Image (cartoon, rainbow, N blue to C red):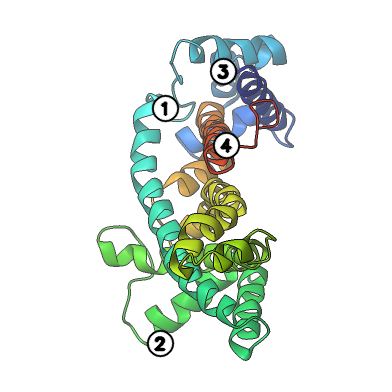
Amino acid sequence: MLRAVVVLTGAALATFALLWHAPGDPALAIAEARYGQNVSKEVLDFIRAEAGFEDGFWTAFWAWLAPLMQGDFGQSSVNGRDVWPDLVTAMSYTFPLALVSLALGLAVSVPLALIATRRPGSWLDRGAVALASVGVAIPAFWLGLLLILLFAVQLGWLPAMGAETTTHSILPAMTLGFGVAASLTRIIRSGILEARGQPFLPAFTRRGVARRDVARDHIAPHAAVPVVTVLGLELAFLLEGLVVVEVIFARPGLGSFLVNAIFARDFPKVQAVVLLAAVIFVLVNLAIDMIYRSLDPRVSGRDA
């Protein structure tokens, strides 16, 4: 918990410092986002006083952090509304898409890795490794544009933008799920092959233990240790990919929420998204450690 506090405080401080020292006048960005292009000096002075820009960095940072420690994310610098309800609305679009993408990646990677490990070194194995390598190398924004050109523009099967219906989530989920599947396929394949090479497995075979029982009780737990680690990190890193993908597909999720807040220099909104991402990373790593210890009892609390 102490480490989590350090991580969250550091993330908040670093993000606030980057926004504070970014080129340009933050008061002008807020004024243009709130009132339009033509703003007077009086309006700029009012916004500087309202946002605390004239009080100095540490005073402004503490003015934002103190209410946050009591569960208050503050109000938007642009529209004056509470940040938390808008953040919850954005999460309602982003989190389901992240879970669907992760499920799609698992649905593809597990069968592909099992097929590849049946005959290591065969053309199926080499093909699966090659496909996974290509999937890792393809940027999400480029793959998303290709899918839009193929399925939305050329074929007209799926919508390219928006989030009104379930079909609007297919192309974004495919874009993110392909990268997840590529990473997991390589890790699952390596984990299975390494588990099969453990020196104690032939002893179970000589004792007459069925292959299915050996695979379920001994190979699977050993192979699951690196898979759980990568799977948890993939869930956290999906938030990073969602920022780009949601902008490409014009989805009203955390990605669009964050990009619009950055352009408007809306400090409370940007900070809320950064802290949310930091909390997710902390919780995911905590869950990984707990699952890791349950899979491998040799790991002590200090080692975890």
Tell me the CA gap for discs 3 and 4.
Answer: 47 Å
Tell me the CA gap for discs 4 and 1.
Answer: 38 Å
Percent coordinates x, y for residue 295 in the rendering: 54, 43
Depth check, mark 1 against mark 3: the one in front is: 1
Image vertical order of residue 257 relative to residue 126, above or below:
above
For label 2, the residue is 154
Percent coordinates x, y for residue 57 in the rendering: 71, 16
Tell me the CA gap for discs 1 and 3.
Answer: 15 Å
Any mark on residue 293, and which? 4
Tell me the CA gap for discs 4 and 2.
Answer: 50 Å
Earlier-in-chain disc, 1 versus 2: 1
Earlier-in-chain disc, 1 versus 3: 3
Depth check, mark 3 against mark 2: the one in front is: 2
For label 3, the residue is 51
- Residue type for callout 1: Val
Earlier-in-chain disc, 3 versus 4: 3
Task: Please indicate, yes or no, whether residue 43 appears anywhere in the rendered image.
Answer: yes
- Image marks 1 and 3: residues in contact by CB distance under 8 Å: no
Residue drawn at x 69%, y 25% is 302
Residue drawn at x 36%, y 87% is 155
Image vertical order of residue 51 relative to residue 286, above or below:
above
For label 1, the residue is 83
Earlier-in-chain disc, 4 versus 1: 1
Earlier-in-chain disc, 3 versus 2: 3
Tell me the CA gap for discs 1 and 2.
Answer: 40 Å
